[in-house]
Image (cartoon, rainbow, N blue to C red):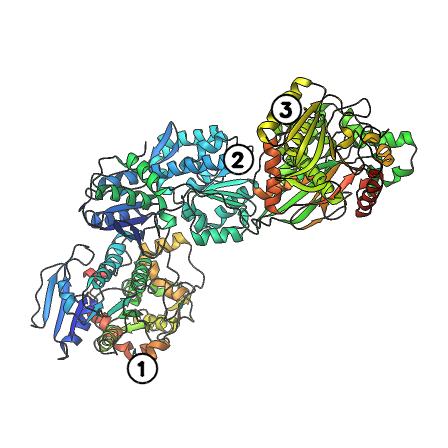
């Protein structure tokens, strides 16, 4: 099998690539990079091109049996323009190239959709085509949703994986970037040095205690993509949606208390159900470094439903937080260096 | 002059597959793709919604410059303002400079062109549509229709401060708009445009409610399809006329469900199949210009556009009447006798009062304003399905009171009534009975009233003659033979050279083979005879100044005199079984005269049953569901959407009489009761008249009747 993978140098992409290369059934892996790169494995071909550039040539696609599209921008701080450029244009170009292929049926696209991360609101994350777009001021969520809709509207055969909040792998807890719950961990790690916080018993945080945060170890997510390559072939235009998460992992209250216990023993998070006024929200980001999107999922948690994923890949494919809690914290302590770029 | 923004050539002029990138600044939609066939070219149109983010638009232009064949901007204009005070959009200028290889189409000029064309057509069909109406502009300084609508006599209101800077201030009139634009020019140019994000405001609760209240107070709303589509509630649009640059199918449906009276949009009848309606103008400009480039035409864009329009026969959309959306009209009537005044519960005690008190009360009442009396509902056109509701206003005065009134005072009262009707949503008002007899029959009222006025004379004349013809046919005393379409019978018009007489003569000449015209002025008679000869060459026309010589063998006599000095004909001389159609006011034939000849049928007017299931909420003195012809004229004009002063003055026009008759036939109006001097003519009366006439005809000798 010949696979074309985008975003192979990213957090999830690296894990997927390793899994592909560990399987001898994979004859060839094409990956793209803006820089000129090489890979030691002879089965890997690196093509230097920019996915958002409409002129780019994808000749190698004629040979591909499947496309794994993981590339995209993942930074809440980036502006709308960057998000649009990095999240929407690549999928549009990819769709155009697949349509142009002389070979029929066209290879299926396995797409990592993460619009729900940073969206929040009173939503239900169902395994069906997206109908309502997030507002444009939520640039990340909006552009990711637009990208997913572009693939849906293209009518190409696709598996669309709606990933939960990616965290470090379940074995080592290794992660690459401060993100999701790591923001809170970083904040507490820094704040515990402040004398004032030592005396605070309850620290107010905007979250609803009953919600669930769909934490997904990156290795679990990668395995799903890898296994999806061997699912029965899709018919032309067939599209499937999967919610890649454990719907019960993890309750916001439990996660919050676990993090506080680990980083600020003696203090407890105090849930604030109502949304912060905009000026507080803005200033808290400046003060704590926690982007407002972090709280979207916890203030008004998204209802999580993924029967299709469970029936296709089996129950408990994404472990519960309790199963990787220790490695999760261990990973943070190992990877987070106060003076590194992560601390910024 | 029409110009495209950038049309110096495309990347590959001979390529038949063209790519257009639409950048939508207002909406937040998924990326949409459409294909447009415009032989010999095929266009792939891909729309990106950037939600007023100019950096994103800039990066899209940078990415696709040279790759796409055209950029079409939607939801943005080159500038805001009014002539003499324009604010150019700095971000727009930046974007225009960004594209170096691919042309950018904003199509302001094309939009203006179609706006002007469509409005001209609308004003031709409904000249009074904007006249004295409160027209609210969503953003007047960005509207291409402002000048034309202002020139049509509209009362201009604008929500610019609300839409641009969130300030709940409404501008009144062109001078305030001009002042606002001037203030905007030097100080707020670049800053204001950062605030202008109309779609954002259109969703904000307080903005929506303020704008909603303003829309409710206006008669017509002029807006932008993109911004209107983003509004959450369309409830304020109920009963309003909406003028928009474009409106997509789903928004149109929502608006119609909300009860919008009429939607006027500037998107023409498309000559390009599958053209996306909501992005019509910029994409249309791109399609036309790309075709021009492909053909390597030497013509500039504006000349090529003219050729394209000629070839494709594109024209503005016709005005549509929408089923289920009611139109309103109004009608003024008054008490015909003093007795009628005492039918109202509050005036009933006067019935038994002494005469001097009654007269005093009559005079006092005639100074009261018009009162809303009731309405006519359920009138639905058979042809279009359009529904009309007519409000009735009672003028508490008798003919004596009206004729005694100073004309200026009467006009003032009528104008006040028209204003009252307008506030209730009427688009036209009809004058009934003596309200049109006194003074200049509606001319002054129409000039000063806030809505068009009609006196109903055209349809009254048409239905009276219609009734006369029907009575002649019902009596069946004339020869059944026909000459062409004409009865082989004789008709006489007394007072033929007057306004009603002339129109009656022309119309009757189309139905009767022989016509006798009677009038006092021979020169006018000869003139009319020539006119009839031109209209109906087959009709035999005799002219005379004396009616008695020809009256004895006339089967139909139409009297249309302004005779004040007694009878114009001797009823004893009239042929048995003849129909006398008395169009004169005051009447030529009195009740007593008519009673002398039961073998002659005297009719005064034809009443009408309107189409649908008409229901009057009060008694107008006619058998249900008949209405007076003058009322029917008002309703028919509303059914047709002809909100214009149709019949004015005492002069009748043949064209208008024919036209309103045809409108009646089109919408399904039927003749019902026929009125005689003693009231409604019954079937029994007709049968009795016929038998008596047959009896008398046995001994009837022309020239020996007396």
Q: Where residue B7 sits: x, y (%)?
A: 23, 39
Determine the chain carrying the residue at label 1: A
The picture quadrant where one finds residue A323 is bottom left
Q: Residue at x 45, y 52 (%)?
A: B251
Looking at the rendered image, the quarter that the N terminus of chain B falls into is top left
Q: Is residue B216 toward the left or the right of residue A236 in the image?
A: right
Image vertical order of residue B412 relative to residue A316, above or below? above
Q: Residue at x 74, y 44 (%)?
A: B476
Q: Is residue A222 visible?
A: yes
Provide the secondary structure element on which disc 1 rests: loop
Looking at the rendered image, the quarter that the C terminus of chain B falls into is top right
Q: Are marks 2 and 3 in contact (CB under 8 Å)?
A: no
Image vertical order of residue B359 relative to residue B282, above or below? above
Q: Is residue B29 toward the left or the right of residue B435 in the image?
A: left
Determine the chain carrying the residue at label 2: B
Q: Are marks 3 and 1 in contact (CB under 8 Å)?
A: no
Disc 2 versus disc 1: nearer the observer: 2
The picture quadrant where one finds residue B438 is top right
Give the residue at mark 2.
Answer: B130
Provide the secondary structure element on which disc 3 rests: helix
Which mark identifies residue B528? Answer: 3
| Nearer to the camera, B659 or A135 | B659
Determine the chain carrying the residue at label 3: B
């Amino acid at each position: 099998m010949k696979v074309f993978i985008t975003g192979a140098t990213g957090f999830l992409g690296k894990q997927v690539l390793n899994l592909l290369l560990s399987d001898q059934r994979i004859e060839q892996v094409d990956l793209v990079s803006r820089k000129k790169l090489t890979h030691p494995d002879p089965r890997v071909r690196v093509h230097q091109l920019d996915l958002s550039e409409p002129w780019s040539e994808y000749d190698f696609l004629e040979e591909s049996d499947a496309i794994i599209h993981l590339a995209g921008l993942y930074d809440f701080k980036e502006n709308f323009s960057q998000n649009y450029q990095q999240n929407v244009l690549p999928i549009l170009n990819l769709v155009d190239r697949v349509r142009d292929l002389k070979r029929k049926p066209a290879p299926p696209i396995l797409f990592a959709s993460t619009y729900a991360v940073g969206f929040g609101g009173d939503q239900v994350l169902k395994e069906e085509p997206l109908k309502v777009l997030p507002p444009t001021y939520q640039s990340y969520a909006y552009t990711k949703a637009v990208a997913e809709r572009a693939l849906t509207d293209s009518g190409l055969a696709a598996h669309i994986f709606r990933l939960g909040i990616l965290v470090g792998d379940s074995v080592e807890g290794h992660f690459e970037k401060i993100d999701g719950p790591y923001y809170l961990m970083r904040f507490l790690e820094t704040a515990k040095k402040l004398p004032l916080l030592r005396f605070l018993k309850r620290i107010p945080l905007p979250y609803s205690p009953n919600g669930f945060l769909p934490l997904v170890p990156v290795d679990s997510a990668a395995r799903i993509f890898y296994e999806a390559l061997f699912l029965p072939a899709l018919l032309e235009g067939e599209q499937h949606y999967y919610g890649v998460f454990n719907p019960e992992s993890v309750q916001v209250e439990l996660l919050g208390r676990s993090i506080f216990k680990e980083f600020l023993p003696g203090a407890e998070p105090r849930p604030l159900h109502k949304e912060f006024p905009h000026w507080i929200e803005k200033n808290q980001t400046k003060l704590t470094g926690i982007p407002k999107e972090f709280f979207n999922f916890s203030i008004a948690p998204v209802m999580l439903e993924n029967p299709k994923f469970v029936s296709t890949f089996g129950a408990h494919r994404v472990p519960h937080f309790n199963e990787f809690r220790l490695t999760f914290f261990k990973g943070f302590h190992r990877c987070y260096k106060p003076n590194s770029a992560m601390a910024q | 002059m029409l110009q495209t923004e950038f049309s110096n050539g495309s990347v590959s002029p001979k390529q038949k597959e063209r790519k257009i990138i639409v950048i939508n600044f207002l909406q937040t939609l998924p990326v949409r793709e459409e294909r447009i066939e415009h032989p010999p070219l095929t266009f792939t149109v891909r729309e990106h919604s950037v939600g007023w983010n100019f950096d994103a638009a800039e990066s899209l232009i940078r990415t696709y410059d040279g790759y796409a064949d055209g950029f079409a901007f939607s939801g943005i204009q080159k500038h805001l303002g009014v002539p003499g005070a324009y604010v150019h959009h700095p971000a727009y200028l930046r974007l225009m400079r960004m594209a170096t290889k691919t042309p950018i189409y904003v199509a302001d000029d094309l939009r203006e062109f179609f706006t002007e064309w469509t409005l001209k057509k609308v004003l031709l069909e409904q000249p009074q549509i904007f006249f004295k109406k409160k027209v609210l502009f969503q953003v007047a300084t960005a509207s291409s229709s402002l000048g034309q609508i202002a020139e049509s006599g509209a009362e201009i209101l604008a929500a610019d401060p609300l839409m641009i800077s969130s300030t709940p201030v409404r501008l009144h009139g062109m001078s305030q708009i001009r002042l606002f634009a001037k203030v905007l020019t030097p100080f707020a140019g670049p800053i204001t445009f950062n605030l202008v994000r109309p779609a954002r405001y259109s969703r904000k609760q307080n903005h929506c409610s303020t704008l909603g209240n303003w829309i409710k107070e206006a008669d017509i709303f002029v807006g932008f399809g993109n911004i209107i589509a983003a509004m959450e509630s369309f409830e304020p649009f109920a009963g309003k006329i909406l003028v928009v640059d474009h409106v997509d199918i789903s928004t149109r449906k929502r608006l119609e469900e909300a009860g919008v009276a009429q939607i006027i949009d500037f998107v023409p009848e498309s000559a390009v199949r599958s053209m996306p309606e909501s992005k019509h103008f910029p994409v249309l400009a791109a399609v036309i210009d790309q075709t021009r480039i492909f053909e390597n035409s030497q013509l500039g864009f504006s000349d090529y556009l003219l050729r394209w329009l000629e070839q494709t026969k594109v024209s503005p959309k016709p005005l549509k009447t929408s089923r289920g959306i009611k139109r309103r009209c109004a009608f003024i009537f008054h008490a015909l006798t003093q007795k009628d005044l005492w039918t109202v519960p509050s005036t009933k005690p006067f019935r038994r009062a002494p005469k001097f008190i009654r007269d005093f009360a009559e005079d006092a009442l005639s100074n009261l304003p018009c009162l809303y009396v009731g309405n006519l509902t359920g009138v639905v056109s058979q042809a279009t399905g359009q529904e009309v509701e007519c409000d009735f206003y009672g003028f508490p005065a008798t003919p004596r009171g009206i004729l005694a009134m100073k004309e200026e005072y009467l006009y003032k009262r009528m104008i006040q009534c028209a204003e009252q009707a307008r506030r209730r949503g009427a688009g036209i008002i009809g004058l009934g009975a003596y309200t049109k007899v006194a003074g200049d029959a509606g001319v002054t009222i129409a000039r000063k009233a806030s809505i068009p006025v009609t006196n109903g004379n055209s349809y009254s004349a048409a239905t009276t003659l219609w009734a006369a013809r029907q009575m002649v046919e019902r009596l069946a005393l004339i020869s059944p033979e026909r000459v062409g379409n004409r009865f082989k019978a004789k008709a006489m018009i007394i007072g033929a050279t007057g306004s009603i007489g002339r129109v009656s003569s022309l119309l009757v000449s189309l139905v009767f083979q022989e016509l006798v015209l009677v009038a006092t002025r021979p020169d006018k008679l000869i003139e009319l005879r020539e006119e009839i000869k031109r209209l109906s060459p087959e009709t035999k026309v005799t002219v005379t100044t004396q009616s008695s010589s020809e009256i004895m063998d006339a089967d139909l006599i139409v009297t249309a005199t302004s005779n004040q000095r007694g009878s114009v004909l001797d009823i004893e001389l009239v042929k048995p079984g003849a129909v006398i159609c008395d169009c004169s006011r005051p009447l030529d034939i009195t009740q007593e005269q008519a009673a002398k000849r039961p073998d002659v049928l005297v009719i005064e007017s034809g009443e009408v049953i309107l189409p649908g299931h008409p229901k009057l909420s009060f008694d107008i003195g006619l058998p249900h569901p008949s209405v007076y012809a003058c009322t029917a004229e008002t309703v028919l004009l509303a059914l047709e959407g002809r909100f214009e002063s149709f019949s004015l003055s005492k002069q009748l026009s043949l064209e208008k009489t024919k036209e309103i008759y045809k409108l009646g036939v089109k919408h399904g109006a039927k003749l019902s009761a026929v009125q005689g001097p003693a009231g409604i003519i019954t079937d029994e009366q007709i049968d009795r008249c016929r038998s008596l006439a047959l009896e008398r005809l046995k001994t009837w000798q022309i020239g020996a009747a007396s």
